[in-house]
Amino acid sequence: MDVLYFAWVRERIGLPKETVETSAVTVAELIEELKAREERYAAAFADLSALRVALDQELAEFDAPLEGVREVAFFPPMTGG
């Protein structure tokens, strides 16, 4: 699946997008797999309260299932203006 990173998440990881092979069943499990890769991922996902996730461009929760999902996007909360 494609994993996209936006704003400071992209800056910490150093990539805007990557294709990931995963055995994760939920978003939370995917995050744990990513955090185990390298310190930059651990830093980006250290505070989940500062992150939001979208699955195939629909906002989701961290316990959402990944079955059938083609794209996961991580980004900070959006603020209105």
Image (cartoon, rainbow, N blue to C red):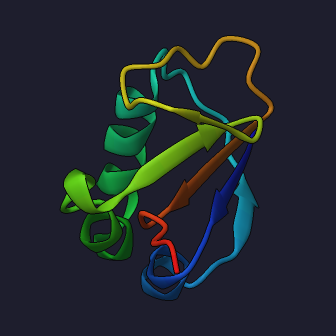
Which residue is rendered at x = 51% and y = 45% of the image?
53
Name the image quarter holding residue 15: bottom right
Asked if residue 65 lies left or right of residue 32, the reply is right
Q: Answer left or right for 70 relative to 62.
A: right
Q: Residue at x 74, y 24 (%)?
A: 69
Residue 19 vs residue 53: left or right?
A: right
Nearest the eye: 53 or 31: 53
Q: Is residue 56 above or below residue 51?
A: above
Drawn side of residue 46 relative to residue 79, left or right: left
Q: Position of residue 44 (x, y in %)?
A: 34, 70
Residue 67 in which image quadrant: top right
Residue 21 lies in what quarter of the image?
A: top right
Look at the picture and state if 63 lies above or below 72: above
Q: Residue furthest front?
A: 81
Query: Where residue 38 sits in the image (x, y, percent)?
Result: 35, 67
Picture coordinates of residue 33, whole percent (x, y): 39, 41
Point out residue 29 in the picture as x, y percentages from the top left corner: 37, 28
Pick the front one: 18 or 81: 81
Q: Is residue 11 above or below residue 71?
A: below
